[in-house]
Image (cartoon, rainbow, N blue to C red):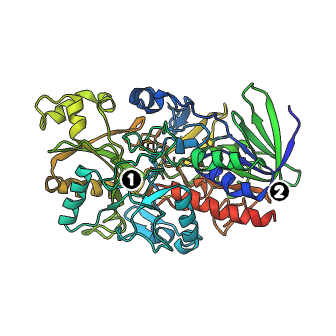
């Protein structure tokens, strides 16, 4: 084993959490090590190729995990510098203020966070600046108060989506511009300026950006921090296997990793920050069980790996009577029933646009798709169906449930049990509500479930929005982390990905991960002076 190198900070994982933290801490001059199990994602034509990315899953992991029954599945995870943000759709929304309080849902209680929206608001603002968020304030009635405008103007709707916006307004609803993180400068008509890094293409959602214009954590955090701060060191192909502690169990003394050549290396830090994604972070803590922490590091509460949440969501395609040649489709959101249905006392969730699907993506479901599309387009080639398709994402909240948990089998394989799919009624109602409007919005009256990314529907492999596996709180009996995301039971161990979420709300999680990381980063800078 290589000898231990000592750092002020060791950060494990370079996604939204770890990459952002490296960026935040780097100007301090402290010695920082960023360990990443993956490599840089190759820049090649396949980055934007539907067959390579969606059908062949060229860039996704081939790990096999087990579900509750023992059946194998491959989780939707991407192990590269930048983590899953290399592939994300960059829809960067704040949680609503109400999400931080207790909310009664149809299926149970969404518990309160130990922080309020106002506590996080300054960090949300900084996160939006860092991740190039384009948006329009004061449009969405459920938005919380803001200390300032969005740092970049909203991405303009293309004509079919503008029409959809206008039709929704005509129905008395309040559509808003979806906040999106991309390095896009727009002409008056919304097209990319000559100097714009983002070319406003149709590959934002689910594809890595070939021209590095998506605000992912590699592009906006890791690479700029490495370029400016020699005190930050990135080691790729370093998969952290376990954390070791001193005899008291209160200090992490070694970070043990398997390197590209199969050798084992050890690193140590005054502070060790885990940010492997909510599932892999929980795995790392569980794998680090020792005499002082027999059921997993920091797991005296028995909450590590539990309370897994991932949203109840659904990708739908509606067929527009008019063609939909939109390229950058992720520009519109509708949160009308986020907090309460108009004929129901419980929250329903939100609707937002997805990336535009193409004929190749539809091929996977060709027979059904052609039959369905034939109603609208007699020749119904997949390309024709894709041209008329408009893609929507319906998302509602699932609730933390201790039985929904990650454990490790005796042979070391992760086992993810989703014993309790809860609070599913709101999504059904949201779909009904949405479908009831389709005729008025210029669509065929039926929607079709769309494959999203690499899986169909909410299979167990749908791990894109993972959260809750090491929640934070004031009570060490019922939470893993304290308010600064430090493990209650250790003095130098922090976890800063979405593991800390107490509830998940119904909006995409990444802006909240980034904002919280900036908040915790400030605490860490104070801690090390
Ligand atoms: C297709 C897709 C679309 C999405 N769209 C959106 C969206 O529009 N908006 C949104 O808010 N969210 C979206 N998400 C979710 C978003 O990507 C995640 O919320 C975000 O990336 C989580 O950040 P993280 O730092 O917690 O984890 P990750 O980004 O997963 O980063 C974790 C990092 O840790 C590394 N790692 C893991 N284990 C180890 C180990 N043992 N040793 C060393 N390194 C390790 C991984 O390789 C990875 O780089 C999407 C996700 C996917 C997959
Ligand atoms: S829309 Fe812009 S950011 Fe997204 S993939 Fe295309 S060029 Fe990259």
Residue at position x 21%, y 61% in the image: 166
At label 2, counting other C-alpha atoms closer than 10 Å, the crowd grade (few under 14, some 14-19, many 20 or more) is: some
Residue at position x 46%, y 69% in the image: 149
* Residue 253 seen from this side: no
* Left or right: residue 458 compared with residue 436: right
Residue at position x 13%, y 38% in the image: 376
- The secondary structure type at the circle numbered 2 is loop
Mark 2 or 1, nearer chain start: 1
* Quarter residue 378 falls in: top left
Q: With respect to residue 62, does 88 lie above or below?
A: below
Give the quadrant of the C terminus. bottom right
* Residue 346 seen from this side: yes
Some atom of ligand 2 lies within 8 Å of the CB belonging to the residue at label 1: no
Circles 2 and 1, Cβ within 8 Å, touching? The answer is: no
Q: Mark 2 points at which residue?
A: 250
Q: Name the residue under label 1.
A: 186
Q: Position of residue 295 (x, y in %)?
A: 72, 48
Q: Residue 384 carries which label?
A: none
* Left or right: residue 34 compared with residue 325: right
At label 1, counting other C-alpha atoms closer than 10 Å, the crowd grade (few under 14, some 14-19, many 20 or more) is: many
């Amino acid at each position: 084993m290589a000898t231990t190198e000592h750092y002020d900070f060791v950060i494990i994982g370079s996604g939204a959490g770890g990459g952002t933290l490296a960026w935040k801490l780097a100007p301090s001059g402290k010695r920082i090590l960023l360990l990443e199990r993956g490599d840089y994602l190759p820049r090649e034509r396949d980055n934007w190729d539907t067959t390579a990315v969606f059908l062949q899953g060229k860039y996704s992991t081939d790990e096999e995990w087990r579900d509750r029954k023992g059946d194998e599945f491959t989780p939707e995870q991407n192990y590269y510098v930048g983590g899953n943000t290399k592939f994300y759709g960059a829809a960067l929304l704040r949680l609503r203020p109400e999400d931080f309080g207790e909310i009664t849902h149809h299926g149970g209680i969404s518990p309160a966070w130990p922080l309020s929206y106002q506590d996080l608001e300054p960090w949300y603002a900084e996160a939006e600046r860092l991740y190039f968020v384009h948006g329009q304030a004061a449009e969405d009635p459920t938005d919380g108060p803001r200390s300032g405008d969005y740092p970049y103007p909203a991405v303009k709707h293309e004509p079919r989506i503008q029409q959809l916006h206008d039709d929704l307004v005509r129905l008395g609803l309040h559509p808003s511009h979806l906040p999106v993180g991309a390095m896009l400068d727009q002409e008056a008509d919304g097209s990319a300026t000559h100097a714009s890094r983002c070319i406003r293409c149709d590959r934002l959602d689910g594809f890595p950006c070939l021209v590095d214009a998506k605000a992912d954590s590699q592009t906006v955090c890791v690479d700029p921090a490495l370029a400016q701060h020699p005190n930050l060191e990135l080691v790729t192909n370093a998969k952290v296997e376990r954390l070791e502690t001193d005899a008291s169990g209160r200090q992490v003394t070694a970070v043990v990793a398997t390197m590209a050549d199969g050798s084992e290396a050890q690193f140590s830090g005054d502070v060790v920050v885990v940010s492997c994604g909510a599932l892999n972070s929980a795995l790392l803590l569980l794998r680090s069980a020792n005499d002082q922490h027999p059921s997993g590091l920091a797991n005296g509460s028995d909450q590590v790996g539990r309370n897994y949440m991932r949203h109840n969501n659904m990708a739908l395609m509606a067929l527009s009577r008019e063609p939909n040649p939109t390229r950058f489709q992720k520009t519109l959101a509708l949160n009308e029933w986020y907090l309460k249905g108009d004929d129901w006392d419980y929250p329903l969730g939100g609707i937002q646009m997805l990336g535009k699907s193409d004929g190749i993506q539809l091929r996977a479901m060709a027979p059904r798709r052609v039959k369905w599309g034939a109603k609208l387009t007699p020749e119904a080639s997949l390309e024709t169906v894709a041209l008329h398709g408009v893609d929507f994402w319906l998302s509602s909240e699932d609730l933390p449930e201790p039985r929904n948990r990650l454990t490790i089998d005796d042979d070391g394989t992760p086992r993810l049990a989703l014993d309790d799919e809860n609070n599913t009624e709101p999504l059904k109602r949201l779909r009904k509500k949405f479908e009831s409007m389709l005729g008025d919005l210029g669509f065929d009256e039926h929607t079709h479930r769309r494959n999203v990314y690499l899986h169909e529907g909410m299979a167990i492999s749908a791990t894109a929005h993972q959260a809750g596996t090491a929640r934070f709180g004031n009570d060490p009996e019922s939470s893993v982390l304290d308010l600064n995301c430090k493990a209650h039971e250790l003095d130098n161990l922090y976890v800063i990905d979405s593991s800390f979420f107490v509830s998940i709300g119904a909006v995409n999680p990444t802006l909240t991960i980034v904002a919280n990381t900036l908040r915790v980063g400030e605490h860490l800078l104070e801690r090390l002076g």
